[in-house]
Image (spheres, rainbow, N blue to C red):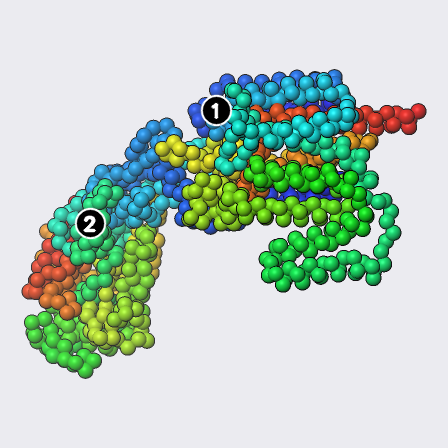
Amino acid sequence: MNRQIVQLFALSMLLFATLVGFTSRWTVFEAQDLKDQALNRRSLIEAQQIPRGLIRAADGTVLARSVPRGSGQRRVFERTYPEGELFSHAVGYSFIDRGSVGIERFRNAELTGEEDELSSIFSELQSKAPEGSDVTTTLDMDAQRTALDALGGRQGAIVAIEPSTGRVRAMASSPGFDPNEVPTDRFSRLNADEEARPVVNRATQANYQPGSTFKVVTAAAALGSGKFNPDSIVDGASGRPISGVPLGNFGGQDFGSITLTDALTNSVNTVWAQVGEQIGRKTLVEYMNRFGFNQDPALDYPEDQMNASGVRNADQRLLDGDDGFDVGRVAIGQGGAEGQIQVTPLQMAMVAAAVGNDGKLMRPRLTEKVVAPDGRVEESFEPEEQSQVMSPESAGELAAMMSRVVEEGTGTAAALSGVPVAGKTGTAEVFGAQLNQLWFIGFAPVEDPQVAIAVTLEDQPLGTQGGQVAAPLAAQVMQTLLR
Amino acid sequence: MSARTRELIGLIPVSLLVSAGFAAVLLTRTEDVSDATATYGLVFLGLCVFAHLFIRSRLPDADPYLFPLAALLAAFGLVVIYRIDAELAREQAQWFVIGLMFFCATVVFLRDHHTLERYRYTIAAVGIALLVMPRLPGIGSQVRGAYLGVQVGPIQFQPAEFAKIAIIVFLASYLRDTGDVLVRARLRPLSSGRQVLMFVVPALAVLAIALALDLGPAVIVLLVIFTVSMAAVLRERPSIKHFGPLLLIWGLAMFMLLFIRDLGSSLMFFGGFLALLYVATARLSLVGVGATMFLGGATYFANTVNHVQQRIDVWQDPFDPELYDAVGGGYQIAQSLFAQADGGLFGKGFGQALLELPNGTSILPAAETDLIYAVIADELGLFGAAGLILAYLLFASRGFKTALVAGDGFSKLLATGLTAVLALQVFVIVGGVTKVIPLTGVTLPFVSYGGSSIVANMVLLALLMIVSDHARKGRARMDQGGLV
């Protein structure tokens, strides 16, 4: 009998081991599958019960907070955005039924106080209810307001960056939306607006033709390659064949043989197209890559809300130096059937920032620091170099050339009293439409830049120019940030 | 160190655990530890010390670990129930006191468990009557399709919890007498030619027929095992007189499936029966016949009784949208798995698991009874849940140990049966919650909320300890004799 009893005990051990095995299957090995199962609403319910941290502007102004509804065990938290439309794209929103975007999405872990399993054990021992950390952004209240007011509801975007640190001081996209209305029906209607697309963050998602502002990239490649200097003479006659097809200057103007400095001041297409052809595709793409083109911007922002800038073919594929695009026309911010240069306003602000910061591109960022509920700074984001685009000497030469643009060239409307400004204008004819895309990029003060900026307006009537329409808006925002 | 001193020392961690557990739950509720925490721990310790003193005087030689393990499980259950609903915990604590009273009463009135042998047919009749009660009009009640509850006036109880003890006592007593006659000791070993003739030929014949009829693979395996086992059983030329009662037990299990409509309790009863049959006869063939007959019957009923069929369907696919929100649908097992997934390795901590929707409705159906293991896995993680299973394994090991050292066949079978049926109950409910087998409404012994469960299991514990006391007393005397 005893032998059978021992066998029975062995069987019990086997059965209990099966139970532990299956428990580990659900608690550990297949836990993620179960959490992802569509019928599982636990994470959503729990997320509602955790007070998310605040999102603040650089000066501490609250941009997003959680307010409790109900009481006791049934208390849930809902997000409100005190500044309404002002930060709709940068900050984004977070609602259980609508999901989340922007900083709300990128910093979700910090805002909900998500912890790894070990540290959550310590919180359990201390019986702390989960609570989110606060996120302080790099965004400046006044600059953001000025930028959004400057756009005045017109479709376009403004991005302002501090060149020496990469801190994004303003990120405005117009038209916008009020994030407080996201849970309502009104938002669904806005979302369905195919024309104005208010939910799209034009600053990071739009693919615009950069027009002549791209000549700054071409100039950086030209100076950096050593083949050109600011005084190099190039024949600027209108109608020169580029890739076998004659290219005209703005208004058909002939400039004769002029220096590169003069060619940038007057935005001479034929000169910069020739420069592009002489430096070649490989060098141009190399310098584009150093500026951050051909990849999602290294911004602390959700990946699917950013687009890479670069030369794209008809299928929107990014081309590299081995692909045969019309380098002369790309060099002046246009392109041909093989590929068009398309950029985001954020990318163009990064170009201006890198030139202003002695050729050193700082990684752009929106988060200044993360502060725990107990006031401890959990994470502080130090300035980080993304790449050295060109030598400080070349950057200085290019900055001087861009200063001339604002002093006496196409960008005089961006001038500020008492503060030297460097910049470049752009006016791109929207492919296949009788409309212009207007641009201004630049930085100020020239010697020690505090702000780099990109301003763009879409679908402006023919005859308008970047220097007339976009440059004054840049001046307003730069003025605000330099105060 | 005497057995009782070891028992007393074993109770210290139990009271510490119950104090710490209540403190943890209270902390998450009110942010500060009230005096209530210490009170809970002290009251529990007081009760356990009282029970210990009682055992010291009445069962001085009983196994020293059984009671602390049961107290540990009960304390653990109390903490988890308190976390779910403080009012339920208060009731459960009252049931624990009543359970202790039943424990003491059993020990006082049943000085010698051999007395039970005299009343075995009465006990069997009581057991069967208890099982039938839930189907009686007026007092029976149906919960989620199964007939398990009885309501007489204000008193509500689950007769199956008590029936399991009665049935085990009867079986232990019956098989002690007939176990030897059921099989012929010392059969001559068969030559290999005869073995082929006896086992392989019928197996192949059945296999051929099954394949010809295009039966499913599970059915074919069942049939082949049944044939081979049956051949082995028939070789012993059993008498119908002795096998009659066994067929009756099988019929009873089938009857339970059909009338009580609960797969889990049927499995528990029949499993306990097979365990005893195996220990009494040492014949795996009998287990083979019994198990295949049970599974065959269960499959048949699964196809005919809607409620059982549905349980099996949602077991196979808890997320099936057609059954998800149906009564007894996949929602319960799905929520059980979701709760466990939230637990991870270490769990979310006492009081941290999500049990309610924001509007106050429960997200885990029957969290304090059927799904209490899911709550434990959620709050204490894999480690906590495995620790609980380990406690049951230790309890089972002490139970089987009691059976090993018991001097006579009845004591051995009784201890084995009681231990096996408790272990099986754990397997049925935890297996159901973790989707090893279809989920059925059985309580987790000592841990789940429920008066019947606590009281019945305290009686079970009392019986085990009486057997243990007798067995170890006998051994102690033998040791002394050896010294002289």
Residue B357: x percent and y percent?
39, 35
Tell me where residue B16 sits by quadrant: top right
Q: In the rendered view, would you say A256 is above or below B30?
A: below
Residue B45 bears which disc, if any?
A: none
Residue at 71% from the left image edge and 43% from the top image edge: A10
Q: Nearer the viewer, residue A211 or B336?
A: B336
Marks 2/1: CA distance? 48 Å
Tell me where residue B419 sits by quadrant: top right
Quarter holding the N terminus of chain B is top right
Quarter holding the C terminus of chain B is top right
| Drawn side of residue B185 relative to residue A22, left or right | right
Secondary structure category for the residue under label 1? helix
Residue matched to label 2: A189
Q: In the rendered view, would you say A377 is above or below B77?
A: below
Q: Chain of mark 2?
A: A
Residue A354: x percent and y percent?
26, 59
Residue at 23% from the left image edge and 59% from the top image edge: A206
Residue matched to label 1: B86
Please, what is the three-letter code of the amino acid marked with disc 2?
A: Arg
Q: Chain of mark 1?
A: B
Please, what is the three-letter code of the amino acid marked with disc 1?
A: Ala
Secondary structure category for the residue under label 2? helix
